[in-house]
Image: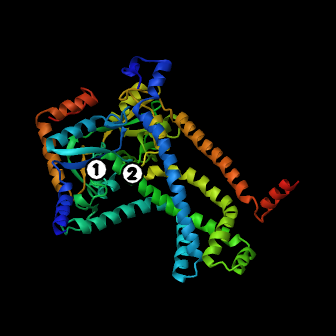
Amino acid sequence: MFSFCSDPSVLDGLAWLSCYLTTGTHMLFYASFGVVLLLLAITAPIALLFGYGGAMASRSRIAPLRWFGKVYTSMVRGVPDIVFFLFVPIALDQGLEWLRHQALCDSDAPVRQGNDFVVCAAAKLPLSTSPEWVHDIYAMTLAVIAFSVVFGAFAANVLYGAMQAVPRAQLETAEAYGMTPRQVSRRILVPQMWTYALPGLSNLWMILIKATPLLFLLGIEDIVYWARELGGAKTSSFAYPHPDWRLYYFLAVLVFYLLMTWVSERVLDRVIRRLSAGQATMAGEAQRKAGAL
Amino acid sequence: MKKLLLAATALALTAGMGTAQAIRMGTEGAYPPYNFINEAGEVAGFERELGDELCRRAELECTWVKNDWDSIIPNLVSSNYDTIMAAMSINEERKAVIGFTQDYLPPAPSSYVALQDGVDLEGGVIAVQTGTVQASHIAETGATMLEFPNIDQVFAAVRNGEADAGFGDHEVMRPFVEESNDLVFVGEQVNLDEGIGVGVRQSDTELREKLDTAITAMKEDGSLNALIKKHFGDDAQTYE
């Protein structure tokens, strides 16, 4: 990074530290914070979408759709997260490769040969020849899907409960005005359910933030991986030898997670306050009275 | 339309071939001096240099992939990468699941480390890295075994008193012991393995033969011995 970093063994004190903290691996460590934030930014809306779909399916008048919604929410919520994170990416990856094997390979060699799962070179996903970033994005996509499926199931239950909590009288009034079921749902049900759903969703968001270290299970190098890797004792095989510093690295990670939760609390408080305005709930009523005085 | 389809199929079929066969090499990246992640964030160490040379000789186009030790064999058999070069000793248990090339390092001794001499190696608590030949060995002795996911945590367990001693590959432990002022080698060295080889899928005989030929060539012209001496010192065991 800096010009004086070419020979770290002669450096000491602040110069050594400034070189040490700007090595390539440290840059990857800093970038991994971005990876975690990116995962959160992509996963949260997709999980919410899954949840909305699940909740709508659970409320559906069409029986098979309703069964699907119920099975999805209860089954996924009942399986330990870690099992799902191990299962979904492997199943997806092997399933896709098997499909591509059927379509793209002209050999009829079996996919399973003893212990091995082998598809032809053209069916590999991603191809062995693809650059590293393609592999990274592929792994990240599988991770996003696994996270979304799991958190979507929880969100579905929260949203389902919130939809049930909207007073029936509100919906009946809308029907009396001659609105179609679709209009009732879009104009009355959905806008009002958020105020009931938000406490549950904010819980989920917090749990999602804390679940991101599971990324490492999927082969993505997240902040916890790098903290462990960089903090471990380094011998003179490395340019910057140091004793076991994991404590400090994990401390930095801890501060990051606490900051994330602190910021989220602020934002969610504000959103809850805004959504309560004009609602026939205690919080909404309190706001109305405060404004009237 | 038909021509277009034909052209597309031909392209799809040949795309994987290219000029040289593309190989992904899996390694742990946490086992210096065999393999580790250097300051630039790249795989480095003895196996990096050896692997690159083997690829050059076998005319393979290689990229390195990091993978946790725990799942390094499952990810090989499910074809996430094609070889393992991660100081993996050849033994019967592993041979049941994956194939190995001939050894590229002679059988290496394993050693005990502790904070002082005279700890009970037969009945005490011994820390090892999980899934290693050293772990299998401790499981057969009378000692209580503590398993950790990487070698770093083995040292940490010895230092904080959780374990009476740690047991691991001598060459990996040597720099840690020499550069520390608290750890010492204790007890006798143990010879456990049949040498270290490249792990490949059992069905991948073609790749195994290519790598075998390259290793034989490097043993014959002395370049493998030179590489071993460069990374493990002049006293390291070499090939005759």
Q: Is residue B21 above or below residue A156?
A: above
Give me the chain letter of mark 2.
Answer: A
Q: Position of residue B108 (x, y in %)?
A: 28, 38
One can see residue A80 in this view: no
Q: Is residue A108 above or below residue B126?
A: below
Q: Quadrant of residue B14?
A: bottom left
In the rendered image, which residue does mark 1 sit on?
A130
In the rendered image, which residue does mark 2 sit on?
A137
Q: Residues within 10 Å of mark 2 (few under 14, many from 20)?
A: few
Q: Position of residue B220 (x, y in %)?
A: 11, 37
The reply to whether label 1 and label 2 mark residues of one chain is: yes
Secondary structure, mark 1, is loop
Q: Position of residue A29 (x, y in %)?
A: 46, 38
Q: Is residue A14 above or below residue B35?
A: above
Residue type of the residue flagged with mark 2:
Ile
Secondary structure, mark 2, is helix
Mark 1 and mark 2 residues within 8 Å of each other at the beta carbon:
no
